[in-house]
Image (spheres, rainbow, N blue to C red):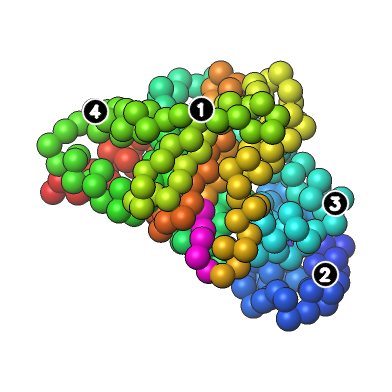
Amino acid sequence: MFVSKEVSDAHKKFLMQRGDEFDSKNPFSKILRGELETEIVDENPYAVVIKNNVPRTSTYNLVLPVYPAKDVIDFASNAPKEYVLGYQMAIEKAVQEIYAEYHSKKSHLYSSCARVIFNIGPYSQNSVPYLHAHVMGDKDLVGARQLTLSQKRSDELKARCCDQSIDKVEEKVLLDEIEKTREVQNRDAEKIRLLKDGQVLGWKESSYLDKYSQRGRKGYWADFVCFLYACGIVGRKAEYEQGKWGGRAVIDVYSDGYIIAHAAGGCVLQKLPLIPLTRKQLAEHYQNNRS
């Protein structure tokens, strides 16, 4: 399936405007130019939702903005406002559909039923230099902290699993982080737990946003954008452009409707989607490590 002519024409127009500023050789740009077929889940004039060709969860889609951007920083800085809003709405629609399917299913204590992930920069091990939101859903996703571990911290976690159960290891990792917690206030008085891990991780921050069911489509995204500003993601643009910084931002929607945002950066993070994303994959991953 190819994208519509409207999407293709708009993407080509923006590519001409950006000129040499944007490298259009990547496969996502080719899809949006109508040069490659893919399995399209949804489309509007501002964004295209496609199925991930490496599905690691029951639902695993990628949301591509029609405006060509390397990542969320580039997009926020340069895309027209209507394209930013259209992209947000495409992501939120994908999350709504996942939430409706999985929110009533039994979920692990530290897991969510719907998740949105943005990789930012080469240190996040982002494989395609085109902004894409990973939107996934399953009945038993692992906690987002697993997804924001540095590679070094992940190796330490694997070693710990050799003589302990997975649940005990997860609990120990959470306790390690809670002991380093302090609360800070952002400009909107939202409480943020700031989790430091020295040179191993760089920095990590988490924040409770509002309930999905209470604020609906526009609520959590506005809070998430404020959270990213409070984390300093946009403010780190100069460091990012010099190739010294990269990170990952995650939105988790839990079965009870609560939303938690996570961000981490300044380190080499585990690669997506190759790391375990569900509890079953996590168990298999550590079992293989023991053997």
Query: Does 246 sit above or below residue 99?
Result: below
On the image, numbered disc 1 is attached to which residue?
A: 183
Q: CA distance from mark 4 to mark 1?
A: 26 Å
Q: CA distance from mark 3 to mark 2?
A: 14 Å
Magenta highlight: main SS: loop
On the image, numbered disc 4 is attached to which residue?
A: 168
On the image, numbered disc 2 is attached to which residue?
A: 14
Q: Secondary structure at mark 3?
A: helix
Q: Position of residue 50 (x, y in %)?
A: 65, 54
Name the amino acid type tagged 4.
Lys
The reply, left or right, for residue 288 in relation to residue 243 is left
First along the sequence among labels 1 and 3 = 3
Q: Nearer the viewer, mark 3 or mark 2?
A: 3
Q: Position of residue 167 (x, y in %)?
A: 27, 28
Q: Position of residue 61 (x, y in %)?
A: 59, 48
First along the sequence among labels 4 and 1 = 4
Name the amino acid type tagged 2.
Phe
Name the amino acid type tagged 3.
Lys
Q: CA distance from mark 1 to mark 3?
A: 33 Å
Q: Secondary structure at mark 1?
A: strand
On the image, numbered disc 3 is attached to which residue?
A: 81
Discs 1, 2 touching: Cβ within 8 Å: no
First along the sequence among labels 1 and 2 = 2
Tell me where the magenta segment starts and ends, as one range.
243-247
